[in-house]
Amino acid sequence: MARSVTGRLIWLFSCILGGFAPCHAEIRETSVWWLPRNVNMFGHEIDFIFYVILWLTGVTAVAVFSVMIYFIVKYRAKPGVPAIHSHGNNALEVIWTTIPVFIFLALAIYGNEQWTQMRLRTPPAEALPVAVVGEQFGWNVRYPGPDGKLAKMSAEKVSKENPFGIDPADPDGRDDFTTYGELVFPVGRPVRLYLSSKDVIHAFYVPEFRLYQDMVPGRVYDFVWFKAEATGHFQLACNQLCGQGHYKMFGKLSVVPETEYEAWAKGKAPATTARTKDSRSTPVALAGR
Ligand code: CUA
């Protein structure tokens, strides 16, 4: 029997969704319909303020709409009943203006304090420095070698051939290694990011870290840091519409035990090369060695 148009559409969408389901599950391990799980130490406060605001506005919305619908029905036009003209109630106005003012002030003060903790405090000295430079359409990533130090980045030096804007003679950079779109972080250790962009505005966004930071060309952002509290595989997604390939600008991000991180880092060659968009098969020389 021939299917109806609706039946065909449902069948088609089921196939499409069915096809996407496995890759979706890989990106988002749990909680597909709600917030992804949080693995960053700063994420708890962000989730807390999110739920506070959600409950405040949710309860208010239900209360306001319930009263409104009740009054609309109760005081609807009836034959023979004249309309009452009301000038309002000053005491009520003052009360329902004052309460939200204090709620907003409390949210602003709490939010500001959390922001200060996350972005304005100096990252811990033992933090692992990692540089991430966005480009159309991928991520250049630079890790420190055994010396634990990253070559100094300067936004003025960033170019196609030198995505990290480093001085090739910088001794701290001799043992650095780079990856393209592959990020591995040790669990339980602070990580300090050095973010920049080669071309247009990109954004470093990891929902599971509750971490979002725009990357504007001409600047190096050195104040973003986090500490992952659990291991797992996540996706680094660019969150600024940066061109035709924006949709595919993602990186593979893993949080692993420290020993596993050490083993991974050891297996990476020092940064004598850097991959750029035009040179994936033939890496160009970066740090002179
Ligand atoms: Cu880079 Cu969108």
Image: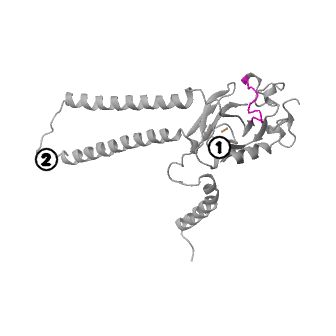
Q: Is residue 216 left or right of residue 281?
A: left
147 falls in the magenta region: yes
Label 1 secondary element: strand
Q: Label 2 to label 1, Cα distance in Å?
A: 64 Å
Question: In terms of image quadrants, where is residue 24?
Answer: bottom right
Q: Position of residue 34 (x, y in %)?
A: 50, 51
Query: Please, which residue is most extreme toward the left here?
Result: 80
Q: Position of residue 10 (x, y in %)?
A: 55, 64
Does ligand 1 reach within 8 Å of label 2's beta carbon? no
For the residue marked with disc 2, what is the amino acid? Pro
The earlier-in-sequence mark between 2 and 1 is 2
Instruction: Tell me the residue at 38%/43% (across/down).
Output: 55
175 falls in the magenta region: no
Q: Is residue 227 above or below residue 31?
A: above
- For the residue pair 90 and 230, the one nearer the viewer reads as 230
The residue at which mark 1 appears reads as 236
The residue at which mark 2 appears reads as 79
Image: magenta residue range: 143-155
Q: Is residue 166 visible?
A: yes
For the residue marked with disc 1, what is the amino acid? Leu
Q: Is residue 249 visible?
A: no
Q: Is residue 123 above or below residue 16?
A: above
